[in-house]
Amino acid sequence: MNFKQALADAAKQGPGDHTEVIDLNEYIDRVAHHPTIAATAHERVYDMVKAAGWKDGLHAGEISYNFFSAELFGLDVPLERVVRYFETAAQGHETRRRILLLWGPPGGAKSSVAGLLKRGLEAWTATDDGAAYTLQGCPMHEEPLHLIPDALRAQAREHTGVPVSGSPCPVCRWRLDHEFGGDFLKFPIERIRFSEARRVGIGTFEPGDPKSMSMEQLTGGLDFKAIESHGSDSHPLALDWAGEFSKSNRGLFEAVEFFKNPAEFRNLFLTMAQEKQFKVAKFGYIDSDTVIVAHTNEAEFRAFMADQKNEALKDRLVTVSVPYNVRVSDEEKIYRKLLTGSGRDELHIAPHSLRAAAMVSVLSRLKEHENLGLVEKMKLYDGQEVGDWKLAQIPEIKRAADHEGMSGLGPRAIVDILSGAARRAGEEHATGKYLTPIMALIALTEYIERLEAPKETREQLRAFVVDARTEIDRVLKDEVRKAFVPAFGEHAQELLENYLTNIEAYCQGTKTVDPITKEDRDPDEKLMRAIEEKVKPAVSQSAKDTFRQGVLMRIGIALRKRERPLTYETDTVLATGIEEYLFDQLKDIVRVTVSKTNPDREQAKRLNEVLTILIEERGYTEHSARDLLDYVGHLLNR
């Protein structure tokens, strides 16, 4: 189907909430068959998250929830706490009467969590599993089971398996009496789909100027034109029902910058959370079932918690700290999403560019640990075991790192820096915007020099840039090495055959034959050890026998599987050693090739082969590939 046809079909469908109208009897039958239709707000959110599934997180004991994992990175621990809040609230525990408060440093994804939950509810209520129904015309789109009289609610629970609590809103109560003569079976019921734009089941409140703020923004106020029609300001239809509490009923309410609200506003939230009700002038308390997700920055959170006057509200909060991410690979995902998510600009990001910036950011957020350097800790958190430190020790290390991730460079600032660097590079070279690892580190260095921070902080950040550059230099040389080795494929093949001949003789206790003199010789221990020391991780002297026997076994298996021709890459473990050894042997040739302004025919041919590999197989453009070769040539010349 082409786009124009799809557009026409969508236009014919009209608003998504135009559905059939049913009565209470039909609704009760549907609830009995599918109880989640009448889920509470907390149950609905938990069902939504649970339905997406979960998997083991990167670190021991952590869980990664699929609902969040495509959008939020490196936050498995706080997100698990968020899910536990919804789980216990859905089970009917007292957490359902608590405000979920997310707090942490700026740019730490607190509002992103709330936003994802809101968008998720919009999509979830459009599915059969997430279906929700309401009394037709209800300004609070309330639960239809509220029509059931108190005396029959126990029987209703037996029939449907769902407990019934709450009373009809004043409008529905008035309509029940005056439109339907008290016959609640005549009250029409329809399906709804939550929508923040249409103000159905989702609300948001952000404090503004205290002088202009009104509590009616939350509770709703009088509709003066309606007063003229109904003759009284106490008539249910004289209210505008435009408050966020009404509109977010049965869904989710996001309270932005929660502690910036005046005390009287916070008291409204307290009553709403604890009593599941809110008060409107000249009316009694109105029932409401809403998840309240609030968020604030760390400074305001700590100031609020330190004030003893706030004890009542403190008891109504379930607090979850949302720190910065401390995993380099997840930080890369954050940058890529923010830099390319709009889809408006063509931005080429050369391999390892985001990793270079991510390392600086993560290093700035980590806390010292005894006998574990920050660079090693960064690698460990990212899934790479370092020395005697194992991944299983990460939970213990994290417990000892109080306040880790709550300070340091935030992702918003880094993305601004990288975006600016890419734009300047495009303008300078008259190309599209592009970013390389060294450009990223230079831009970060310039930012640090301008940063309004204590001298000690700037010095520490500069040291982190140096650490990141050391790691990236190693990676970039490895990148060029891997691109050059295929250009010397025959050398790699000869090296493989030579190594296999020697280890076979070594393991069998025999001699090798000199290819020229045909003399018997002892296996070349120097060659074997030179390659084995280049393997990642390096093979120790004491482990060489086991390693050599393992290579012969793996090669033998490959041959039995008819994996021919046999290449240096057949054994992936051995391949790293051969590549590294060959690169060392050819280092001078590589240096001359990438550094020469006017290469000869053979050098130019080899250089073009390397450029082709970098562009077609490694994700570079011609410009960024040449930048890489120039930089690595500079490193080799030093």
Image (tube, rainbow, N blue to C red):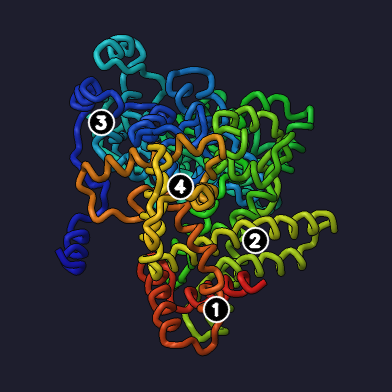
Secondary element at image label 1: helix
Q: Position of residue 272 (x, y in %)?
A: 55, 30
Q: Are marks 3 and 1 in contact (CB under 8 Å)?
A: no
How packed is label 1: few (under 14 Cα within 10 Å), some, or many (20 or more)? some
Q: Counting residues from the N terminus, which is met first, the one under dot 4 or under dot 3?
A: 3
Q: Which residue was labeled with disc 3?
A: 187
Q: CA distance from mark 3 to mark 1?
A: 86 Å
Marks 4/3: CA distance?
Answer: 93 Å
Quick one: label 2 or label 1, which is nearer the N terminus? 2
**Label 3 Cα neighbours within 10 Å, binned few <14 / some 14-19 / many ≥20:** many
Label 1 sits on residue = 592
Query: Which sits in the foreground, 572 or 353?
Result: 572
**Where residue 18 sits in the image (x, y, percent)?**
23, 47
The residue type indicated by label 1 comes to Val
Three-letter amino acid code of the residue under disc 3: Phe
Measuring 60% from the left and 66% from the top, which residue is drawn there?
Answer: 440
- The residue at 65%/55% (across/down) is 360
With respect to residue 290, does 258 lie above or below? below
Who comes first in sequence, dot 3 or dot 2?
3
Crowd band around label 4 with a 10 angstrom C-alpha radius: few (<14), some (14–19), many (20+)? many
Residue to which mark 2 is pinned: 469
Viewer-proximal residue among 430 and 156: 430
Which mark is nearer the camera, 4 or 2? 4
Q: Amino acid at mark 4?
A: Pro
Q: Secondary structure at mark 3?
A: loop
Q: In the shown orientation, is residue 69 left or right of residue 454?
A: left
Q: Give me the C-alpha separation between circle 3 and circle 2.
A: 69 Å
